[in-house]
Amino acid sequence: MRTALPSRLLRGAVASAAALAVLAGCSTDDSVDDPPASTSSEDGGTEEETQSSEEWFVQEDYDEQDAQRSATFEGDPEQPWLQYIDGEMTDTSSYASQDPQKVCFANASISNPWRQTGWITMNQQLQELQDEGVISEMETRDAQDDDNTQIADIDYFISEGNCDVFVISPNSTAAMTPAVERACETGKPVIVFDRGVETDCYTTFIHPIGGYAWGIDTATFLSEELEEGDKVIALRILPGVDVLETRWAAAEKIFEENGIEAVDYFTGADPTEIKKIISDELVQGDVQGVWMDAGDGAVAAIEAFEDAGVDYPVMTGEDEMSFLRKWEETGLTGLAPVYSNFQWRTPLLAIQSIVAGEEVPKEWVLPQTPITEEERTEYLEANDGMPDGHYAKFGGEDLTGYPDVWQDRKIP
């Protein structure tokens, strides 16, 4: 039987049910091989799959994540992947074991740089826990951004019957819920991370603060740097993904409150499409700001201003190295919001606690702090030699193989 979703996720799920029904799947910052059509309508959205942000906006969720931006996190700030906001805990004493655990990981995909960075970090953490005898092996099935494939993957693990722990990074929220519930019915620990599902049967759900927090950070920054009446182009990857939709829902609210003219487009993270959108807008008049719901394509957006020979915009990108480097090179006024990539370590470290019979947070909310201009040089230096697709706050500096494994970018 389906159990109750934590109130924050339930409210969002109700608001987004219609769009999730057509979700093809993406990551938190997706670059897709076949992006959705992005023919712009007159209001800046797309003619296909456009949905008002009002249908995603839930004031209570917005207020909660706004408050969590300044919350006190439990744990060592030097290990943010283990920090959490104090709240309900799960008793795991029944799972205590001295035996190495076989982990079954149903992954949505590794189809973009954000997920690839996390996947590399996760595998390095896995090696250390295997050496410590906590985990025997991790069998992984990659759904390649497909709901049906991931459902089949989870059911395969269940029928195989050899899993000690399930780890699931859902492709989408609603579609994956029944499969997650079937995993819970096995009586084994179930760890969900990155995106949620419409049940709380899991042992722990691990994620950064969320989309509203991203939208608040970025739109507040732009509104403070710009003047009333200034124009912002909002570049969005694709519709129907809760964490992306709530980023825009929060940002749109703040832009409206501050008299900022914001026009949004879906781009599929296609650099050519991004350049075209900005070039067309610049022909129509000045553009003072650029807002992005993920960092893919940020460099293309900046290059469009260079090609037009106009002043750089005030801009928000992400902690992807390509944006940080272009930001440094140009000297534009910017902010790098973060959807903490280090969360990919946390599920495996949660297993270490679970098999020790230690309590873990029921909803494990991780820190999510943007990189400011004052911090940019620090993160550039710390990640010197990393490829452009690397994420500055990946949190793997203390793991075996650093920095070579992340520099080589060989996907396990």
Image: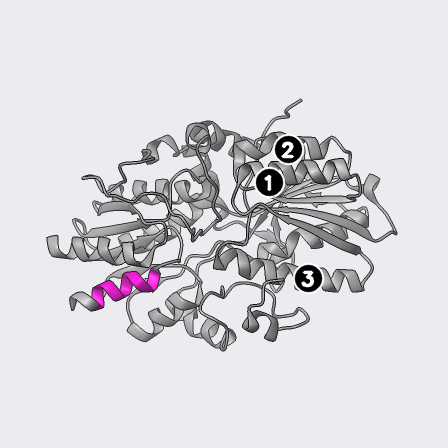
Asked whether 118 falls inside the magenta stretch, the response is no
Q: Which of 260 and 125 is in front in this view?
A: 125
User: Which amino acid type corresponds to the residue marked 1 in the rendered image?
Assistant: Gln
Q: Residue at image x 61%, y 36%?
A: 151
Image quarter (top left, top right, bottom left or bottom right) of the C terminus: bottom right
**Placement of 194 over or under 184, stated as above or below:** below
Q: Is mark 3 on a helix, strand or loop?
A: helix
Amino acid type shown at disc 3: Gln
**Residue at horizontal 33 percent and vertical 45 percent from the top:** 251
303 sits left or right of 86 in the view: left
Badge 3 vs badge 2, beta-carbon distance below 8 Å:
no
Q: Which mark is residue 125?
A: 3
Residue position for label 2:
179
Residue under the point 48% across and 51% down: 70
As drawn, is 47 to the left or to the right of 321? left
Residue 126: horizontal and vertical position, in percent?
Answer: 71, 60
Give the alpha-carbon distance from disc 3 to disc 1, as whole Å.
23 Å
Under mark 2, the amino acid is Ala
Single out the mark in the foreground, 2 or 1: 1
Residue 19 horizontal side relative to residue 104, left or right: left
Highlighted range, magenta: 298-306
Task: Tell me which corner region of the image, top left, top right, bottom left or bottom right, holds residue 47.
Answer: top left
Which residue: 18% across, 39% down? 42
Q: Which of marks 2 and 1 is nearer the N terminus?
A: 1
Residue 227 screen position, x and y as percent: 19, 54
Q: Name the residue under label 1.
A: 150
Between residues 40 and 88, which one lies in front from this camera angle?
A: 40
Task: Classify 232 as above or below 302.
Answer: above
Q: Distance between the residues labelled 2 and 1?
A: 9 Å
Residue 203 in sight in this render: yes
